[in-house]
Amino acid sequence: MSEHKITLTVNGREMSGHAEARLTLVDFLRDVLGQTGTHIGCEHGVCGACSVVMDGKPVRSCLMFAVMADGHEITTVEGLEGPNGELSPLQDAFWENHAMQCGYCTPGMLIATHTLLQENPDPDEAEIREAIGGNLCRCTGYQQIVEAVQMAAKKVQEAS
Amino acid sequence: MTDTTAAKEYRYITKKRRVTEDRRFITGRGNFAADYNLPGMLHVAMVTSPYACAEIKGINAEAALALPGVRYVLTGAELFENINPLLSGLDLPNIKRIPLAHERARYAGEWVAAVVAESRHIAEDAVELVEVDYNPIDFVIDPEEAMQPEAPLVHPQHGSNILCDKSWVWGDVDGDFDAAPHSLAFRARWSRCSTIPIETFVVTAKWDEGKELLDVWASIQMPKYPEQIARALSLPVNAINVHFDVDVGGSYGLKRGIRQTVIVSYLTRKLRAPVRFNEDRLENMSGGEMHGPDRIFDMEVAFDDEGIMHSLKIKATDDAGCYPGRAPLQLGKPVSAIVGPYRIKSASYNAISVTTNKTSQEAVRGFGQAPTNFAIEAMVDKVARKLGMDRDEVRRRNMIRADEFPYRIPSGSEYDSGDYHTVLDKLQTSAGWQELLTKRDAIRAEGKLAGVGISTCLEPSGGNSSFEPFFNPKNDTTTWMESCLIKVDMLGSITALMGTSTSGQGHESLLSVVIGEILERDPDTIRGVHAESLGALPSNSPVGSRMAIMLGGAAAGAAEKIKKQLLEIAAHNFQLPVDRLIYDGGDISVEGDPDKVMNWHLLIDIAHRQYHKMPLGSEPGLQAQHTWEVPTGGALPAEDGTVQMYPCYAFEAHIPLIAIDPDTGQVEILDYHMGHDCGTVLNPDIVRGMSLGGIAHGIGAALYEKFEYDEGGQHLSGSFMDYLLPSSHEIPHVEMVKHYTPSPLTTFGQKGSGESGYLGAPAAIASAVNDALAPLGKSIDTLPMRVRDIEALLNGQTE
Ligand code: FES
Ligand code: FES
């Protein structure tokens, strides 16, 4: 297997590492770069646990090879905090609403709803459910996640 | 959420509090088992059997071992020689369970060999190169066929496919049936499904040569995990250190990966390198041996013109899959609440566990109670329908009344407390029962099918071991204790240790709020710790809806001991008896003389440094431990076949409104309401989350989820494309109404809630679907009620 050097920007920092052509982006992020916040649930594109943002769009990092992300910009759950570790309004709302139990799907849920709020700062319940429709959670029944996103949207709007 | 009862005033418990654990999850800093990357770690991938049953005549690993990076290929034969068979729930000496198939593969997907390599990718490549010489033999997939005399035997040395066949009669069942004017019988089917956590099972083991110590990091939720590893490997338990601070990515009872653990533990000692097995989704779903109950209920009920149910006969035939494990015991726990919340005066129960050539069953949320609740509720609906009575009214007439508690059911369990009528009343009021029926009729008038469902179910909680001796007389376990160790350090902060991992239940938050409540200290300053097994006191893990009760009780007991020590120190220094002192927020003052006060820091400083100010002969420092026996536990089942199973009984009622598309059979849930009473609620966010998650899981079991096998014995549901988990589109918004009937048996009156929602939702959805089908004169008693099943029923292809 041929090895490739991959350089990408992860949460604003340039990082690089070597990967075989067949290594998925999620394995590269987790095992090569040590960014273990992004999770794996199925490796076949259904559960959304591996969601990251690439160049502003959410992608399933289990369905991409690391080499395809070479030169691109990635945001993972680790990149949602502010520069001094302050929680984003969305993270804070997830906490306030206990929008999780085991926390395993949470990175994917945060990525999905973070990108939703960037595109649509005032989503209604149906739009939120649509945005997380490709992210499976076995713990919550989704309702607390919907409530968290509504709360975060409201807070951001009130602040601006 | 509507909250209509005022709870007793507490400082911290019962109040909204953020969950401590959440902070690490929202920032991507959880410590999941796959996040532990050890230097030099090796990876495992499994060679799986393509046959439902086959003799293994030989395994040739030469080509695999020749692949660069491959370090070892482990077979069942080698394991068989070198480890002890895994524990079985029943006394079945001739069925030896080894983590890899030995001599015979007994289901398609069973792990036959473990390939170890420097990366998981290389291990997967090498799996393809392992040549296994199989001789396929006859197999059996259907549990009822498996019970026929001519059926192929899954374990020939056992001599039968029946693992157990036990019967009990509690009360005068025959007499009550003879005396009752009506009876009805039916069959209900709960299909093989499971909890399917989004994280698969992951375990890493590292043998430390220097310390002669086995370190284990695993996504585990299992009682007596270190002991089971020790037994399998013939190691003392103190040579095993399980790191319980690993966050588990969901489990709901399921993650009992003892096979996986024994494999990597054996390998790390053999290969002198850390070894990880991280199941992929297919390994998890097919060979992980984590399927749930798969049950046929033959039900009979005797009742009168008023709708009063007098007696009940249940025959439950459960397909355990290939190995007995804990599966048969999941037939045992429902004895705890065998008559549901109803005053049925006699009951009989025939519990049959059958082995087939399918992957094995593991403990699933409710431990067999959810299927039983579904069957009981289907029965109540049928009684109502037969008499032309309302389903809620039949329930009301049969439910145990608030003034009858404690209430002993025929099988011997005493229900601690409850107010079922009030919860149902509250729920029907808040849900708008009449409006829902009107809405249903309006939808029907448009030519669609619509139904309102109802279920009223129990959640036995405070998980105890009683079903073990009940099913296996050789097992005389009568305690499932839980422990907590509290340390107050020299500078006054509080640390509490538990000996178990968490899979989302928020045990760190539980410890801090309970200890904060007793010691009147801010819970945010109290740290709960998942100790390593070597540093922990006995635990039986968070199974059976037990931690609020058991860990909460242990923590409260230890905190009371700390408080007592503080009072004794103050009494000594004031030269006054303890009953003259007032404890307030950690400070202690003299009754009637509020200026005489010793504050928290002073008292703790005395305990840690100033032994000359301590009561004579007392222990320096400030620490206490408490190990708590399950309330009502401690006894073997009685000679007459009765047993006190679990201590506490929570109650839940569900009311959904659904519509069914008459052309496609598609079910849409339009409204969902739940009434819940689990006694005093320690953390409202956690309890609500469990109920909502449980409802979602129950909707999955009712409408979507099933492990399918084809006629060739192949497993067809190994991915999320084939096994459907409900998404945010299928799960509706749920309105909850709470009621609080404290348990007299627990510290604050709390009961369990870890299985809530799941124990009533499948029954309620089934009730709604059947209400929708009733105008057509059709009904369905098999779960899941999938689109295609309903469509076939509507089009007259099935009865
Ligand atoms: S792990 Fe990528 S979608 Fe499931
Ligand atoms: S929080 Fe556990 S899967 Fe979503």
Image (cartoon, grey):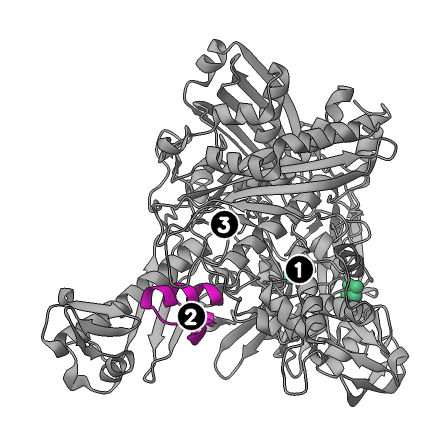
Within the magenta stretch, is there residue B510?
yes
Left or right, residue B362 beside residue A131: left
Dot 2 lies on which element?
helix
Please state the chain letter of the residue tagged with numbered disc 2 in the rendered image: B
Question: Looking at the picture, which amino acid does disc 1 mark?
Answer: Glu
Viewer can see residue B200: no
**How many residues crowd around disc 2 within 10 Å: few (fewer than 14), some, or many (20 or more)?**
many
Q: In this figure, which residue is indicated by the disc labeled 3?
A: B544
In the image, is the residue at mark 1 within 8 Å of ligand 2 by its beta carbon? no
Question: Looking at the picture, which amino acid does disc 3 mark?
Answer: Gly
Left or right, residue B664 beside residue B689: right
Label 2 or label 1, whichever lies nearer to me, is 1
Per the model, the C-alpha gap separating discs 3 and 1 is: 29 Å
Dot 3 lies on which element?
loop
Per the model, the C-alpha gap separating discs 2 and 3 is: 26 Å
* Magenta span main SS: helix
Left or right, residue A70 beside residue B53: right
Per the model, the C-alpha gap separating discs 2 and 1 is: 25 Å
Tell me the quadrant of ligand 2.
bottom right
Query: Which one is in front, B55 or A38?
Result: A38
Magenta-highlighted residues: B508-537
Left or right, residue B347 beside residue B601: right
Q: In this figure, which residue is indicated by the disc labeled 2?
A: B523
**Residue B503, quarter of picture:** bottom right
Quick check: do tags 3 and 1 share a chain? no
* Residue drawn at x 52%, y 63% as measured from the top left: B506
Within the magenta stretch, is there residue B550?
no
- Which of the two discs, 2 and 3, labels the residue nearer the N terminus? 2
